[in-house]
Amino acid sequence: MFNVGDKVVYPMHGAGVIEDIEEQEVSGERVRYYIIKLPMGEMKAMVPLNKVKEVGLRQIIDEEEILKVFEVLKDKTTSMPINWNHRYRANLEKIKSGSIFEVAEVVRNLVLRDRQKGLSTGEKKMLENARRILLSELVLAKNVSENMMAEMIDDFLS
């Protein structure tokens, strides 16, 4: 169970802070929700406490894991399906997994692909989304500005 003030990751949406735990009535039943403020995009999300595992809500990474993410970004070896459709589905599954390491792989792989052959519109949008998710967690985990972390990510990818 998480507490108010905990920094968490909501897969496919990014990282945020639990602002409150509220109880609301849904279909005649009282349900408790985490109210999560997602700073990137100024969004709020409500996650039922009884669905935390199902949606993959987890704590943000620690300093040791941050270093591992940076290693993933620096690694220039990649293996992606040649077929656009297979590549897109594989990357989407990685993003949905909620693993920052897999999201970092997607960012790295799509950046490398973009440099080599360019990206389709769908893949450009996917890269933008994956990068936003990655950035949101690293900003909260390192407690640095969005601009500073974006520059760090770019440095690792170059």
Image (cartoon, helix red, strand yellow):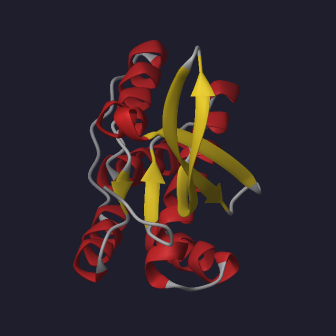
Question: Can residue 12 be seen in the rendering of this structure?
Answer: no
Q: Position of residue 22 (x, y in %)?
A: 58, 49
Residue placed most toward the observer, 42 or 66: 42
Residue at coordinates 32% horizontally, 68% vertically from top-left?
A: 61
Would residue 124 appear left or right of 109 to someone viewing this image? right
Residue at coordinates 61% horizontally, 35% vertically from top-left?
A: 24
Looking at the picture, does residue 17 appear above or below residue 9?
below
Would residue 4 appear left or right of 38 to someone viewing this image? left
Q: Quadrant of residue 75?
A: bottom left
Looking at the picture, does residue 80 appear above or below residue 109?
above
Question: Can residue 135 be seen in the rendering of this structure?
Answer: yes
Image quadrant where one finds the N terminus:
bottom left
Residue lying furthest right in this view? 42
Q: Position of residue 74 (x, y in %)?
A: 34, 68
Number of numbered discs visible in the structure rendering = 0
Q: Position of residue 77 (x, y in %)?
A: 26, 52
Q: Position of residue 147 (x, y in %)?
A: 69, 78
Residue at coordinates 36% horizontally, 34% vertically from top-left?
A: 50
Residue placed most toward the observer, 120 or 151: 151
Looking at the picture, does residue 72 appear above or below residue 110?
below
Residue at coordinates 42% horizontally, 38% vertically from top-left?
A: 95
Residue placed most toward the observer, 40 or 30: 30
Q: Quadrant of residue 126?
A: top right
